[in-house]
């Protein structure tokens, strides 16, 4: 048990550190490590990761909120649909065979890495700002996709939300990230609770993961101020894409 907690803490620290360095949720780091090191099933890794990220999202949202970088109204609107689809995503993940879920996660890792590499250039791309009813509908649709991805993949959903807010609603990067963190707390909680009821959460390692992520996020956020972000993004993307390819190659069990 002590060895398991020790591994959970350093996995959380690593996930939080990478997240703080490159501005990406820790799920893409935690899940492969929980599968490879802690020998959790893919379903257990997704459910456990989502529970840990609920606590991380709460701390992150408070931090961004203290700097005025959270749109509370937009967060509530996104959460309306995200809470519904997060439950659907968790149930869909549970219905998939292990090999299919691993392949799906591999494809998601590659997609997330490509978005990470494009992130510095998102603001310079053509974007438009929606207002009124159009903005309301856009926020609801963002919640639909982000909630489902969060529930299915065991991640925070920021991979979908942040680009949508930056490109479609003309949000600044920090405001988009802070808003994403806040709205995914209730949505992530719904998905995490669904995974818990389905038996996909390993509760014994959660305290270690949460403590590790909080420590790692603090370390990564501070280091990011001194290291070139461009090289960090490339290094991280290469690792995650390599991991994604390995998951994509998961063989189909022989009948």
Image (cartoon, rainbow, N blue to C red):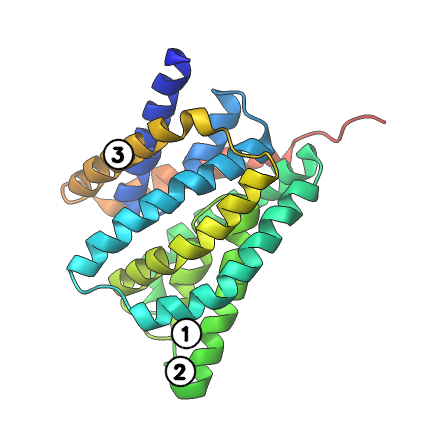
Give SS at disc 3: helix
The residue pinned by badge 1 equals 168
Residue drawn at the location 15% of the way across and 60% of the way down: 67
Q: Earlier in the sequence, mark 3 or mark 1?
A: 1
Of the image marks 3 and 2, the number of the one nearer the N terminus: 2
Residue drawn at point x = 54 percent, y = 49 percent: 151
- Give neighbour class at mark 2: few <14, some 14-19, many 20+ (Cα, 10 Å): some
Q: Is residue 187 above or below residue 139?
A: above
Residue receiving disc 3: 216
In this view, the mark in front (3 or 1): 3
Q: Residue 25, image x and y in percent?
A: 38, 45
> 213 above or below 7?
below
- Tell me the number on the disc at residue 130: 2
Mark 3 → mark 1, Cα distance in angstroms: 31 Å
Q: Quadrant of residue 131?
A: bottom left
Foreground pick, 168 / 45: 45
In the drawing, does residue 176 fall left or right of residue 220?
right
């Amino acid at each position: 048990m002590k060895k398991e907690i020790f591994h959970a803490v350093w996995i959380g620290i690593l996930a939080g550190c990478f997240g703080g360095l490159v501005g990406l949720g820790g799920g893409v780091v935690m899940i492969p490590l929980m599968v490879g090191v802690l020998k959790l099933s893919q379903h257990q890794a997704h459910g456990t990761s989502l529970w840990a990220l609920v606590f991380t999202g709460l701390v992150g949202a408070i931090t961004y909120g203290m700097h005025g970088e959270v749109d509370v109204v937009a967060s509530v609107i996104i959460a309306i649909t995200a809470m519904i689809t997060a439950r659907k995503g968790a149930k869909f993940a549970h219905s998939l065979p292990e090999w299919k879920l691993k392949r799906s996660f591999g494809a998601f890792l590659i997609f997330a890495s490509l978005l990470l590499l494009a992130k510095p250039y998102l603001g310079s791309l053509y974007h438009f700002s929606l207002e009124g009813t159009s903005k309301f509908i856009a926020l609801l649709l963002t919640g639909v996709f982000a909630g489902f991805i969060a529930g299915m993949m065991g991640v925070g959903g920021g991979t979908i939300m942040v680009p949508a807010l930056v490109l479609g609603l003309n949000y600044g990067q920090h405001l988009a990230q802070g808003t994403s963190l806040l709205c995914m707390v209730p949505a992530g909680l719904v998905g995490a609770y669904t995974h818990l009821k389905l038996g996909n959460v390993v509760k014994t390692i959660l305290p270690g993961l949460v403590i590790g992520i909080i420590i790692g996020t603090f370390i990564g956020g501070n280091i990011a101020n001194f290291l070139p972000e461009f090289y960090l993004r490339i290094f991280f993307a290469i690792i995650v894409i390599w991991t994604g390819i390995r998951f994509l190659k998961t063989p189909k069990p022989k009948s």
